[in-house]
Amino acid sequence: MPNTEALLQVRDLRVSFDTPDGTVRAVRGLSFDVERGRTLAVVGESGSGKSVSTQTITGLTRGAQVSGTAYFDGTDLITADAGTLRRLRGAKIGMIFQDPLSSLHPQYRIGWQIVEMIQAHDRQISKQAARRRAAELLTLVGIPRAAERIDDYPHQFSGGMRQRVMIAMAMALDPALLIADEPTTALDVTVQAQVLSVMRKLQEEFGTAIILITHDLGVVAEMSDEVIVMYAGAVMERAPRRDIFYRNHHPYTQGLLASLPAQSGKRLTPIQGTPPSLINLPAGCPFANRCTHVFDRCRVETPPLTDVQGDPRHQSACWLDHDITKAVA
């Protein structure tokens, strides 16, 4: 049964795709909870299953083989019909995609697109009222002269401004859940800070739950309450934000943190090797061929997610001792 305290509860989500080369096991046994007013960050390399998992629970992975459950406010999104999903997307679940140009129609004005979305979910609202709401939203996300710019086309906005427009559209109907897929990609640091500030402000005002998908651990440190680290379609480690940065357990998490630029000017420490094929996954731990602490058991047995130092909020899928002080000699 779903957890009544969690707005979204995902259990044992598995997503695969048939290809001419074989079956791609894109997501393998993902489970997590997101509570109202909280931010869950999902991190990992490209191809780890971050985006596919959230697209699947919102019904956007056509042709996929899906199993598991995803209860959103009492409704299982995995078994919901197309009509139910359409009513939820936009109205209850807002989405910010990685590339705003691919989500905004280039031939329609920004205001028209926001108005259309609002009226699609609220047929009682007039076009004039929806347009006023659109202008208010654009002002809220920091677009200057919003009443004038509402009639501009997407190409007339900078990358950061287009991303703000996407946030405005995602928040137009005060959704309970906001899924933000790389919302600051390709933005300079100043604009990135402004976009994150807008998201925090909206979360504080409406109590919105956020799933933040990102490669940027700096964004994770600033925005998240909890963090899931994914690799090869599976969860390697989950923990509160502070534990991920200061009491992490899994070698993959440690590798991601070690690859960050250091203030001291030292050379980066990359994770050697490449992720395994999701068609022909090796036996044992998927990270074994890149891990500096690998031993024989890692290559034959897949480690389950296990509590670190007895804390159920902090789990790691690794055969190293789960007492952090003994994990690596």
Image (spheres, grey):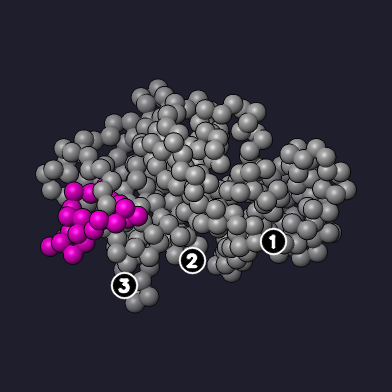
Nearer the observer: mark 2 or 3; the answer is: 2
Give coordinates of residue 49: x percent, y percent.
42, 41
- Circle 1 sits in a helix, a strand or a loop, which is it? loop
Question: Rounded to the nearest whole Å, what is the CA distance between mark 1 and mark 3?
Answer: 38 Å
Amino acid at the residue labelled 2: Glu
Residue in view at x 56 percent, y 41 percent: 73
* Residue 188: mark: none
Give coordinates of residue 322: x percent, y percent.
21, 55
Would you say the residues marked 1 and 3 are in contact, meaning their CB atoms lie under 8 Å apart? no
Neighbor class of circle 2 (other Cα within 10 Å; few <14, some 14-19, many 20+) is: few
Quarter holding residue 32: top left
Amino acid at the residue labelled 1: Val
* Residue 266: mark: 3
Q: Quick check: can you spot residue 183?
A: no
* Residue 222: mark: 2
Query: Which numbered disc flags the more N-terminal residue, 1 or 2?
Result: 1
Q: Quick check: can you spot residue 87?
A: yes
Name the one closer to the observer, 91 or 20.
Answer: 91
**Quarter that holds the N terminus:** top left
Residue in view at x 53 percent, y 46 percent: 7
Residue 321 belongs to magenta span: yes
- Disc 1: which residue: 141
Give coordinates of residue 114: x percent, y percent.
75, 47
Name the one closer to the observer, 287 or 80.
Answer: 80
Residue stretch in magenta: 308-329
Residue in view at x 84 percent, y 59 percent: 148
Position of 163 compared to 210: left or right?
right
